[in-house]
């Protein structure tokens, strides 16, 4: 995002709000960010585990399930919709925006926890599962790959295979290592200026979701700034970020730590790890550090792409994923 564009957008927003006959408030649904399932009844959704999640499916519900888990925390599945191609191959493909993310219901910060996110995932599986013998494959990207691993660590017997695309660290030590090497906003960079500029116009208290989600959406432009360490080619589409869940789970990781690897030695199914060639923060060495916790695994490089490999290089990701699923299905 260019600074000039950011300034013009902010100024236009101010004049727009001032000129409307009907007064608009920036913390009301639909004025800054898209409405969630709580405001828009036309959005596809499911009610599970005490929340309402934006969700949709493709394919025959009786076929083996491939459940996609988006990154973040707080992002959504919009930039991974190409994964629905697997429905043409005989899989039941499930997408959902995680609690507090994308277009799903928002909650106060104090309710979030990693076990709750795992419970939500389990509830989604049970919601869509049509028989006890239906196979379930998890396909996670970034934080979604971490969440998939956390689920396997608790319920190794419930997952028939897993595709993990650039997890951001399967325990606190690895997460800190990856965090230090990636998504760094350098002082005086254009992206930093954008974030600080918008902060002059918009503030937001802990649970003012519309304002905070908008700010996170603007701030996310630094992830694809020129020369970013993760090799991200440019912006990819999203509906809405979830600032509160991002902040809550980050605080938990920093203050309490986490470890998704304590029980992985009981999971003997082969696990597929994917990483982008251009992500200098991840690469083969970091993939090996994560994959070692699984007794059986394979690591595949996706050429000429970075962290957003599923969106930008789905044509290269798809045959690797298809071959993996075919062997296990």
Image (cartoon, rainbow, N blue to C red):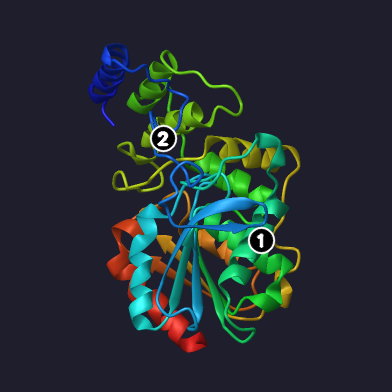
Between circles 2 and 1, the one closer to the viewer is 2
Q: Position of residue 165 (x, y in %)?
A: 47, 62
What residue does disc 1 label? 150
Q: Is residue 98 visible?
A: no
Q: Quadrant of residue 240?
A: top left
Q: Is residue 148 visible?
A: yes
Q: Position of residue 198 (x, y in %)?
A: 39, 19
Task: Depth check: give the residue in front, 285 or 116.
Answer: 116
Task: Depth check: give the residue in front, 95 or 300.
Answer: 95
x 46%, y 81%: residue? 325
Q: At numbered mark 1, what does the secondary structure look like: helix, strand or loop?
A: helix
Q: Position of residue 187 (x, y in %)?
A: 43, 22
Which quadrant is home to the N terminus?
Answer: top left
Which circle's residue, 2 or 1, is located before the other in the chain?
1
Alpha carbon of mark 2 to alpha carbon of mark 1: how far?
26 Å
Q: Kindly identify which numbered label has been placed on residue 253.
A: none
Q: At numbered mark 2, what does the secondary structure look like: helix, strand or loop?
A: helix
* Residue count near mark 2 (Cα–Cα under 10 Å), binned few <14, some 14–19, many ≥20: some
What residue does disc 2 label? 217
Is 276 placed left or right of 294 in the picture? Answer: left
Q: Position of residue 131 (x, y in %)?
A: 60, 83
Is 31 placed left or right of 141 in the picture? Answer: left
Q: Quadrant of residue 112?
A: top right
Q: How many numbered discs, if any? A: 2
* Residue count near mark 1 (Cα–Cα under 10 Å), binned few <14, some 14–19, many ≥20: many
Is 21 placed left or right of 177 in the picture? Answer: left
Is 290 placed left or right of 64 in the picture? Answer: right
x 37%, y 46%: residue? 238
> Quick check: 271 above or below 216?
below
> Quick check: 126 above or below 224?
below
Do the CB atoms of the residues marked 2 and 1 lie less than 8 Å apart?
no
Task: Depth check: give the residue in front, 179 or 8.
Answer: 8
């Amino acid at each position: 995002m260019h600074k000039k564009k950011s300034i013009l957008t902010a100024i236009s927003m101010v004049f727009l709000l001032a000129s409307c006959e009907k007064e608009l408030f920036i913390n009301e649904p639909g004025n800054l960010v898209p409405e969630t399932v709580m405001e828009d009844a036309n959005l596809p959704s499911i009610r599970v585990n005490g929340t309402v999640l934006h969700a949709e499916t493709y394919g025959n519900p009786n076929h083996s399930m491939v459940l996609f888990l988006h990154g973040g925390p707080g992002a959504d599945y919009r930039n991974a919709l190409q994964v629905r191609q697997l429905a043409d191959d005989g899989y039941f493909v499930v997408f959902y925006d995680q609690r507090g993310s994308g277009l799903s219901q928002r909650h106060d910060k104090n309710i979030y926890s990693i076990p709750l996110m795992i419970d939500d995932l389990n509830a989604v599986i049970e919601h869509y599962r049509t028989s006890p013998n239906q196979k379930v494959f998890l396909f996670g990207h970034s934080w979604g790959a971490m969440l998939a691993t956390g689920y396997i660590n608790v319920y190794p017997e419930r997952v028939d295979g897993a595709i993990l695309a650039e997890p951001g660290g399967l325990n606190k030590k690895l997460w800190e290592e990856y965090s230090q090497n990636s998504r760094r906003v350098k002082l005086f960079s254009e992206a930093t200026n954008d974030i600080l500029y918008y902060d002059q116009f918009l503030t937001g208290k802990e649970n003012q979701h519309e304002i905070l989600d908008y700010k996170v959406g603007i701030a996310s432009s630094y992830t694809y700034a020129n020369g970013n360490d993760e090799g991200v080619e440019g912006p990819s589409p999203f509906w809405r970020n979830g600032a509160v869940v991002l902040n809550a789970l980050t605080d938990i990781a920093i203050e309490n730590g986490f470890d998704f690897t304590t029980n992985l030695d009981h999971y003997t199914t082969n696990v597929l790890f994917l990483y982008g060639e251009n992500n200098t923060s991840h690469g083969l060495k970091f993939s090996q550090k994560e994959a070692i916790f699984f007794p059986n695994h394979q690591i595949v490089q996706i050429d000429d792409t970075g962290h957003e490999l599923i969106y930008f290089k789905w044509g290269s990701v798809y045959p690797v994923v298809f071959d993996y699923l075919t062997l296990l299905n």
